[in-house]
Amino acid sequence: MVYVKSITGQPLMPTKRHGFVRRLLQSGRAKVIQRCPFTIQLLYESGSETQPVVLGVDAGSKHVGFSACTEKEELYAEEMQPRNDVVELLSNRRQYRRSRRNRKTRYRKPRFENRVHSKHMGWLAPSVEVKIQEHITRIKRICSFLPVSKVIVETAEFDLQRLKAMEEGRPLPVGTDYQLGEMYDEYNVRQYVLKRDNYTCQCCGRHPTEKNGIRLHVHHKESRKTGGNAPNNLITLCEDCHKALHEGKITLPEGKRRGRPNRDAAFMGIMRKTLLERLKEILEVPVWETHGYITKYRREKYGILKTHTSDARCVTGMMEAVPSDTIYLVKPVRCHNRQTHKAKILRGGIRKRNQAPYTVFGFRLWDKVKFDGRECFVKGRRTSGYFALSTLNGEKITDSISYKKLKLLETANHYLTERRKGSPPMTKVTGVRACTT
């Protein structure tokens, strides 16, 4: 499928007439403006008649499906993997910042009135904000090369208190239980955890008394950097077990380890209304909302295998449309490292800068290149002109190859894109290959 724009930049209906497109490019009546997906722009006046195109969005935290359909055919199918590294990156930045302030401004006065959430109403956590922005950016990019007439977004909202009660085997919340919450009338998180565990070490079962002198600690099952101070991430341990656990001499009992976190379910509940409100403000086409049970009903009625792109096609409601034989896999990445210097100090007390030059012999991080007949991405670069290459799904191609053996295909634009062959709706989708258009 070749996507087409008019001379004024208006998206037109795509075409499969590859021979005609080739003649337009050879005669100079069109130019290539995007390689993957392959998009051209006409350099002469043409008609602007289009068909109704509905864009379905299967919103998610780890995988997002997009499908643009007419009544007869699916014009575009995409699966995106939003970034999930923001929490770790911000935690590292906070660690470096506190270490730097301790070295340089040890007696800096505390400031508690400069928090972002107190100054800006409607503020969202950066890890949530970046995923919402990636949803919006991809929708806008699809609308830039397809004449989308309507956008339908499937959202979901989860009952987190009910999910936690089911996982922990507690009675399901009803009525005022939702208002009181898990830690209602408790002094703080630590006191709640100690009381919940009956002031007993959950590893050896000892209980502190005046005679034995045992001291109780509250231990993070996952690091505070990853799991936070949520009650289900905390457990009561005695001082000896706590020390032995950190030394690696013992492990937590099987039933005491942390269960599945609900980060993705929490994100879906937070982003639901925000995404719809922002889309309605930004887009010039109508934005509708649908729900998962409708998508499930359509998928089961027509016997369609559950994938993110097939769910997005069910969201559009165009069930008679022929599925596309091409699926684009998209992964957003960061192209810069804001950390100024490395954390480790070299010999002589020198702090080395953490960033390589922006371009090395004309190549930059995440450029799409061709090496040994295979398309891949620049994952690492050295000032000597040797690069590390990998595919979008992380498969390593080489750790060190000279720039002389690379051919630049596309410059980095914060979104890595690969094209893979689609499968019939009743078979599984496997295998990824680079874009060859």
Image (spheres, rainbow, N blue to C red):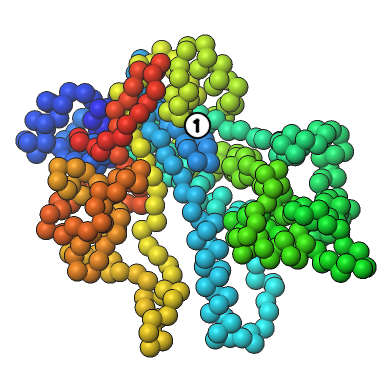
| Residue at x-position 41% and y-position 12% | 320
Q: Nearer the viewer, residue 354 or 199?
A: 199
Q: Judge by depth and name the residue closer to the eye, 95 or 327.
A: 95
Relative to residue 247, is residue 319 depicted above or below?
above
Residue 210, image x and y in percent?
93, 68
Left/right placement of residue 326 relative to residue 385 reads right
Identify the amino acid type marked 1.
Asp
Identity of the residue drawn at 51% across and 56% down: 86
Depth check: give the residue in front, 206 or 376: 206
**Viewer can see residue 103:** yes
Residue 376 in the image: state x and y as whole percent: 25, 46
Compared to 436, does 300 lie above or below?
above
Within 10 Å of disc 1 (Cα), the crowding (few <14, some 14-19, many 20+) is many
Q: Is residue 266 visible?
A: no
Q: Residue 25 placed where, x, y %?
A: 11, 36
Q: Which residue is mark 1?
A: 58
Image position of 140 (left or right of 386): right
Q: Quadrant of the C terminus?
A: top left
Comparing 238 with 424, the one in front is: 238
Image quarter in which the N terminus is found: top left
Furthest toward the left, the residue is 27
- The answer to whether 156 appears left or right of 214 in the picture is left
